[in-house]
Each structure stands twice: as C-alpha cells, then as structure tokens.
Image: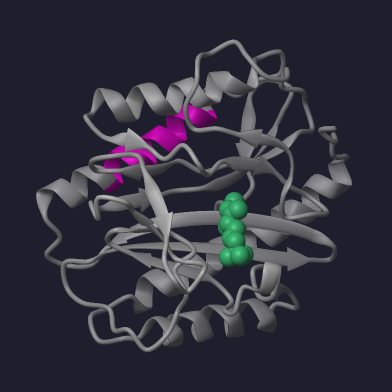
Amino acid sequence: MISLKTKGEIEKIRSAGRIVAGAFELLGDNLKPGITTAELDNLANEYIERRGAKAAFKGYHGYPANICISIDEEVVHGIPGERRIEAGQLVSIDVGVLLDGYYGDSAYTFLVNGVSPEARKLARVTEEALYRGIEVVRPGGHLTDISWAIQSHVEGNGFSVVRDLVGHGLGKKMHEDPQIPNYGKPGGGPLLREGMVLAIEPMVNAKGYEIETLKDQWTVVTKDRCLSAHFEHTIVVTSDGSMILTAG
Ligand code: MF3
Ligand code: CO
C-alpha cells in the first residue's frame, strides 16, 4: 500500500529534508584529507540534534553510527570510524533525519581533490541519472519510468546499476512502499499519484553490477572492487510533476 501524504505531512518531510541538506553543506565543508569518518559522523549528528531532530540510521536494524560513509569501492552502508579521508577518494555519504515523526533521506557522492577522470565521470553520471529519474515523475506516470530513465542513462555511459538495492517510499517510516528499482522497462509498476513521497537513489558501479557485504555485516562493496557512486533525494509527486524535499 502506497500512502498519499497530506500537505501538512509533506511540510514535515520538507522540514526534515532541510536539515538533511544543511548537514550535507556542513559535511562538504569539512570533507578534507586527514579528517576521520567518525569525526564527520559526529559533526553531522551534532548539527542534526541542535535542530531538535534525530539521525535516522542510528540503531536502525542495529546500525551502529549516525550516517553512512562509503569510500571508493564501497557502495553503501559504510560505517564511520577511525579511517582518514585521503586525496583522490570518492566519498558517498548517506544522511537520514527524523523530525516531528517524519523522515527525510538523501545521499551525495563527494570528490576529494585529485580524483581520477573515471571517478569524476562516474559521480557525474550517477547524479545525472538521479535527475533523469526525478524528471520523469508525474501523476499518471508509472513507477518503472523512473527505473528506466536511470538505467538507460547509466548504461548509455558504460556503467552499471546495482540491482540488489532499491529506492523506497518514506514518511512516517524510513522505508515504506513502493520499492523503486534503478533498472527495468518503462510503463510498469504502480501508477504515480499526487502526494506520494519517494526516495530515488541510484547506486552505480564503474564495472560489474554485482555487490557483496563485508564481514562487518554492513559495508556493501562492489564484487569486482571497482568504484561506486550513490546519489539520493526525497521527492514528492505534485499536481504537475515533482518537488525535491531534501534540497537546501
Ligand atoms: N539511507 C539508506 C536508504 O536510503 C538506509 C540506511 S540503512 C542504515 O535506504 F542502516 F544505515 F540505516
Ligand atoms: Co534511502
């Protein structure tokens, strides 16, 4: 069952989303060689708590940190710790916030100075794929129109889309129906309707699409250890298209 949110609920998700966007601004300012991922995690958490919100991932199925930081061949769910950021890394950060009973969720892949042209292209194409997905959202459209917009852009650029992880609805819960695959033929799945709130989140690998989970039970990496990038926004279906709720 896909719930349709009221205007008041959308405002609350927007408020959570603004805090997510602010956290990304702060993280981007502090993402420099030498800082540890635990320090970044702390900065984000202090920022979120000062605004009366909570970091949504902490404790989710036992997740041990506040945000996810996934470096290079790590796809998602990297756990912040004593590892230091280095020049040339591709750093994907995922932030979720709970405010006044509603969630906002977003991810961004940062380039730390001196990134290879290949890594730069991977991040660019993944971000473009997210926006291609968002652009096809409209009431009366189909869910897998999003999937196809993402897959066709990614594969057209010679990269591959992770298949085993998906985007999702959200609102009162961080993960609600529907699941949103980042690949698939257009014109399928449920019809999109005004008031649906969706987290669209392509995860894109430079080579093969296969992934595996490390022994820490969380960190997802590419099976062939190629680079991976991840971008995500929470959006709402409006009367004539969509609006991003996790923008600044
Ligand atoms: N942000 C992820 C998502 O987009 C969820 C993170 S899982 C957690 O669905 F365990 F780290 F919280
Ligand atoms: Co998400």
Judge left or right: residue 60 versus residue 246.
Answer: right
Above-or-below relation of 224 to 138: below
- State how many labels appear: 0
The image shows residue 219 at horizontal and vertical percentages of 44, 66
Is residue 128 shown in magenta? yes
Question: What range of the chain is rendered magenta?
Answer: 123-134
Q: Tell me if I can see residue 19 in this picture.
A: no
Q: Could you say which is closer to the camera, residue 35 or residue 210?
A: 210
Q: Could you say which is closer to the camera, residue 166 or residue 32?
A: 166
Colour scheme shown: one colour
User: Where on the picture, by quarter, is residue 96?
Assistant: bottom right
- What residue is rendered at 68% in x and 81% in y? 49
Can you say which quadrant of the picture contains the N terminus? top right
- What residue is rendered at 20% in x and 43% in y? 121
User: Where on the picture, by quarter, is residue 74?
Assistant: bottom left
Magenta-drawn stretch, dominant element (helix, strand or loop): helix
The image shows residue 56 at horizontal and vertical percentages of 68, 68
The residue most toward the front is 215
Above-or-below relation of 177 to 219: above
- What residue is rendered at 58% in x and 21% in y? 144
The image shows residue 241 at horizontal and vertical percentages of 63, 24
Is residue 166 shown in magenta? no
The image shows residue 29 at horizontal and vertical percentages of 36, 74
Q: Could you say which is closer to the camera, residue 184 or residue 38?
A: 184
Judge left or right: residue 149 versus residue 13.
Answer: left
Q: Tell me if I can see residue 74 in this picture.
A: yes
- What residue is rendered at 21% in x and 77% in y? 86
Can you say which quadrant of the picture contains the C terminus? bottom right
User: Where on the picture, by quarter, is residue 151?
Assistant: top left
